[in-house]
Every structure is written in structure tokens, then in C-alpha cells.
Amino acid sequence: MTRLLVTGASGMLGANLALLAQDMGYEVLGWTNSRPLVDAPFATRTVDFNNQQSLARAFEAAQPDALINCAAQANVDAAEKQPEAAYRINAEAAGELAKLAREAGVPMIHISTDAVFDGTQGNYKETDIPNPLNTYAKSKLAGEHAVAQANPEAAIARVVFYGWSLTGTRSLAEFFYNNLTARKPVNGFTDMFFSPLYVGHLAKALLEMLQKRLSGIYHVYSPESLSKYDFGVRLAHEFGLDANLIRPISARDSDLLTRRSLYLSMNTDKLQAALGKPLPNQNEGLRALHAHLDSGLRQKLLSFTH
Ligand SMILES: NC(=O)c1ccc[n+]([C@@H]2O[C@H](COP(=O)([O-])OP(=O)(O)OC[C@H]3O[C@@H](n4cnc5c(N)ncnc54)[C@H](OP(=O)(O)O)[C@@H]3O)[C@@H](O)[C@H]2O)c1
């Protein structure tokens, strides 16, 4: 049985990935930081990436066969306010983990972001030159460099995703779902484009990347991009909610605290060729989100922190 270490297991990606991997027969060890998990069906341990020595000790104790690093300071506004903490977690600690994994011969996937690009061009390939606009994105790009330098065999998965989370409010899908089910009007950006994967599809793709021992940078997105407004409308249709509650607005007219990239459609040809199959489109993703609501995944994740 493969012993898989998932960092950031109390986060949206880490928790969904740990559950899927456990279901697929991996022995999962999930690392958390400030939010210990209650009744998780996999082993957990608290490890703070701010402490280099305890990170190294915890890695040695974990004895993993494989590692997926989902831990991050992923709050864009918090990173802007505390850049040193963001660089420590997103870049330095990622590099330290990559070095530990290389020394132990453990295959690793490090999670990065579409926000490494400035969003002026669209259809971004792995070979396009990044130009991050804010501290979060700059620290994530520094993390890519630190991981690649410490461990050239590691895979770097650039992602963006939605799904059900432990807080019930982490993802854009939850924002639209929570507000529309409460019949509250919301804004949807018509000029901010992205290529999100449903987190369950993302988790599956990451495990396939691990099995194939891919290394280097991969874009792990849906091949179908859309505006955040259109995403809300599609979600409303999937769940039978009122799409008229979504007001189309321009991100340029909004009061976003931190500067963000606007046109982040992503090219996924490299990963689709490596996996030998297409990645899911938006309707497939939203159907899976709906199916997982019906099967109780949302309640299960919410119960982990209560
Ligand atoms: N959400 C998106 O759409 C999106 C888009 C692009 C890229 N990404 C990337 O995808 C990955 C996962 O994102 P997510 O949305 O799942 O993040 P998230 O929900 O914010 O979770 C972040 C995780 O990192 C852990 N963490 C934070 N500070 C830590 C520290 N000092 N030491 C150890 N662990 C720490 C958190 O632990 P505690 O909660 O226990 O403190 C939590 O488990 C990140 O690399 C992020 O940059 C996400």
C-alpha cells in the first residue's frame, strides 16, 4: 500500500484529495496546521511550516512513499498584508520539503497557481513567461523555483478549482451556491476568466500524475475556460437556482483589495497528452459537484472541523 503524505489536509484541496486517495486504497497521512481535523478517516498530524526543524523531523517520522504539497498561505489579501509569512510557507518551506523528498527518493507534486500569469494574454502554456501581479502570486512563483531547484524530479501542478470545503465558504462554487439557495443577489465578474476544475477531478488527475511519475510543470485545469459570471450562471442551472440573482459586473468596477489577473484561460494540451485523455469540461465538473452534494460529501467535510 502506498503511504501518501498530503500537506494542507485541512484545506479545500488537501481534504478532498486525502479522502479520495483513502477511498482509492492509499494509506494517507494528512498534515494540518491551525485547524486539527475531527474524525477524519485518515491519520493526521499538526505541522507548522514556519518551523524548519520540526518540518524536517515530521517528514522523517512520516516515512512517506509519495508527497503532495497542498499547504499554502492561499489567502490573497492575507499574503499582501504579511508578505514574509507568505514567502516562508509558499516558497521556503516548499523548497525544504522538495529537498527532503529528493534526499528520501520520494516522488513529489507541489501545487502552484494560475495567478503566476498576469492575465493579459490567455491560453497560457507551461512554457509561457510568468508575471505575477500580487504578493501571493509572487510567493507561489518563488515556490515553483525553490521546488524545481531543490528537486528537478518533482512535478509542479498549476491549478485553480472549486468544490465543497471544510468551512463551507472557501470556493467560488460555495459562494454562488450559498447565496443563491438563500435567494440573495450576488455580483459575477464578466471580465475575469478562469479554467477551474472540480476539486474531485483535480485530485484524481494529481494521483494519476503521481502514478505516471510526471516531473516538471503541468497545467492541471479544465480545457474549457469561462467568466466567473458564466460560472455562476452554469452553477445556478445545474442546481435549479435562480440565475437572475447574479448581477453581471466588471471586476474593474469592483472593490477587490488586491490586484488580480483577469484573463486566465489555460492551455492543458501537455497534461492531456501525458494522461492520454481529455480533462473534464465545465458541465462535467458541475455535475460532479452536484453528485457529491447528494452523496453527502459536503456534510462530511463540514463535520471534520466541528
Ligand atoms: N483555491 C483555489 O482555487 C486555488 C487556486 C490556485 C492555486 N491554489 C493552490 O492550491 C493549494 C491548495 O489551496 P486551498 O484552496 O486548498 O487552500 P486552503 O483551503 O486555504 O488551505 C491551506 C492549507 O494550508 C495549510 N497551512 C497554512 N499555513 C500553514 C503553515 N504555516 N504550516 C502548515 N500548513 C499551513 C492550512 O492549514 P490550517 O488550515 O490547518 O492552518 C490548510 O490546510 C495551494 O497551494 C494554493 O496556493 C488554490
Image (cartoon, helix red, strand yellow):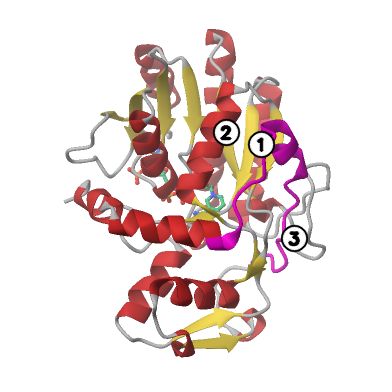
Q: Name the residue carrying label 3.
A: 118
Quarter of the figure with residue 92: top right
Where is residue 168, by image quadrant? bottom left
Q: Residues within 10 Å of mark 1 (few under 14, many from 20)?
A: many
Query: What residue is rendered at 34% in x and 73% in y?
Result: 178
Depth check: give the residue in front, 144 or 49. 144
The residue drawn where x is 29% and y is 43% is 34
Q: Residue 36: which numbered mark, if any? A: none
- The secondary element bearing badge 2 is classed as strand
Give the mark toward the camera: 1 or 2: 2
**Is residue 116 shown above or below 192?**
above
Badge 1 or badge 2: first in the primary sequence: 2
Q: Is residue 196 on the magenta stretch?
A: no
Instruction: Find the distance from the CA under tag 3 to the CA under tag 2.
Output: 21 Å
Q: Amino acid at mark 1?
A: Glu
Disc 3 crowd, CA 10 A, few/some/many (<14, 14-19, 20+): many
Contact? badges 1 and 2 (CB < 8 Å)? yes
Residue at numbered disc 2: 110
The part of the chain drawn in magenta is 260-283
* Secondary structure category for the residue under label 1: helix
Crowding near pointer 2: few (<14 within 10 Å), some, many (20+)?
A: many
Residue 73 in view (yes/no): no
Q: Earlier in the sequence, mark 3 or mark 2?
A: 2
Task: Tell me if I can see residue 4 in this picture.
Answer: yes
Can residue 262 be found in the magenta stretch? Answer: yes
Where residue 231 sits: x, y (%)?
55, 71
Q: Nearer the viewer, residue 53 or 14?
A: 14
> How much space separates mark 1 and mark 2, taking CA atoms?
8 Å
Q: Amino acid at mark 3?
A: Asp
Q: Nearer the viewer, residue 134 or 306?
A: 306
Disc 1 target residue: 144
